[in-house]
Every structure is written in structure tokens, then in C-alpha cells.
Image (tube, rainbow, N blue to C red):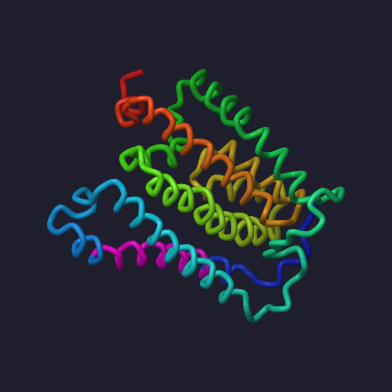
Amino acid sequence: MQFASVPWGGKEVVLGMAAWCAAFVGVGLAFIPVVRAMAGADGFSGLSATDKSVFALANQVAETAVSIAIIRLGVARFEPLPPDLFKYDLSAPFKKPRGWLMWGLLGVLLSPLVVYASATLSDGLGVSDTAGRGTVDAVSSIITINFSTYASLMATTSILAPLLEETVFRGFLLTSLTKWMPVPAAVAVSSLAFGMLTALGFLLGFTYVRSRNLLTPILIHGAWNGSVLTILFFLASQGISIDELLHAPS
């Protein structure tokens, strides 16, 4: 399960992650004047739900482009890279043992079970499982029965966010960590750093390690986010308040 030798060192890992964090924050700050120009003193809360979804999409496009550019520029001097690093390859989707679609579909099927098992364990231990609700909470206030809003949020949460996050956390951080620790430990650390539901992060990391193709965790991540989003829109179409549902006392 070991990756090919990672050619960059600790300095590049630290600087790369720090630059990505700074760029992530910087892009968000750069969009503040845009929001003020569109909504005035009320800021983001003054936008309509459709405008919020379009703004979220534009912001995600910028963050994805800048983030991936920073990571790739950080390792550019080590090119040509080993073939299993930063791999997005549509070929041989079912070829054993690393068929990217084979592992991706398995991950999609396992995702609900993994999340349910993790939530059940968290409840049993009396631990609040808020990390796994990030996508839900992030879009709950934007959901309206409007196709353009749905399409914008789907592109944001199911395509761009997985592309960005899997490239950074699986493609760069996980593979970098394998230089100093066993692969299972690298999967665990990158999952914790990701800040998503840790169990799902483990699944994303495991399937990426098996396929060595970033299309695998991108597919699983996107399918999970898209399923959550679609369920929320369906509930909203039935007249259910998503905010009240999510924040009602347990």
C-alpha cells in the first residue's frame, strides 16, 4: 500500500499547507467588497437565496482554482512526479486491483453505513457529532425551491468542493505524510486535519490509497454531498423548514 517516494520534504509540506490556508482565507476576504456592493450594509444576509447560492459558487470557483494552483506550484520543481501522485485518470475504471470507479462505487455504497455507525457510536459515547454536519449547516439557510439555486449549490458542494478538498488533503497532505509514517497513520492524520466527519474521512483516505486515483475520493465525496443536498431540497419542497429541523432540541 506504500506510495512511490514523495520527492518533496517537510518544508514544502508546511509551506504548502500554510499557503493554502492563507489563500483560502484571502479569497473569502476578497469577496467581501462584492457582497457589500450587491447587498449593501446587510452583507451576505441581505442577499436572496438565489444570489447567495451564486455567490457561494463564484467563491468556490475562485478558492478551488487558487488552492490547486498553489499546491501544484509548490511541487512544480520536483516534476516529473511519480505516476501515482496527483493522478486524475479516467482510464481502466474497473481494472483490478486499482480500478478507480470500482473503489469509488464501493465507497459510495459504504458511506451511509460508515456515517450511521459513526453517529451511533458518538451517541453511545455521549459525544456531539457536529463535524459530519458541515455540508448540511453550510447550505441550510440557502435552500429554496428553485432549480437555479439547487444547480449552483450542487456544483459548489458536489463538484468543486470535493475537487479542492481531495486534491489538498488526499493528493497532497496524505501522500506527503507517508514519507514519515505508515499509510494507515497518514490516512488518520489527514482525516483529522480535514475536519470532516472523521469516519467518512477514513473512507475517503482508504479508497484513495487503494486506487491511487483522486477521482475515487472525489466521486465518493461528491456523491455524499450531492445526496445530502438533494434530500434537503426534497424536504424543503414538502414544506419542512430545514433550519428548524436541524436546530430543533433533541
The answer to which of 5 and 170 lies nearer the viewer is 170
Give residue 201's position: percent from left, percent from top: 59, 43
Quarter of the image for residue 145 reads top left
Residue ranking furthest to the front: 147
Q: Give the quarter of the figure containing the C terminus.
A: top left
Q: Quadrant of residue 56?
A: bottom left
* Residue 220 among magenta residues: no
Q: Quadrant of residue 178?
A: bottom right
User: Does the magenta portion include 24?
Assistant: yes
Which residue occupies 31% across, 40% down? 141
- Where in the figure is residue 206, as x and y percent of width and height? 70, 44
Residue 120 percent location from the top left of the image: 54, 21
Write the residue at 33% across / 57% down: 55
Write down the region rendered in magenta.
Answer: 15-32
Q: Give the main secondary structure of the magenta stretch.
A: helix
Number of dots carrying numbers = 0
- Outermost residue on the bottom side: it is 77
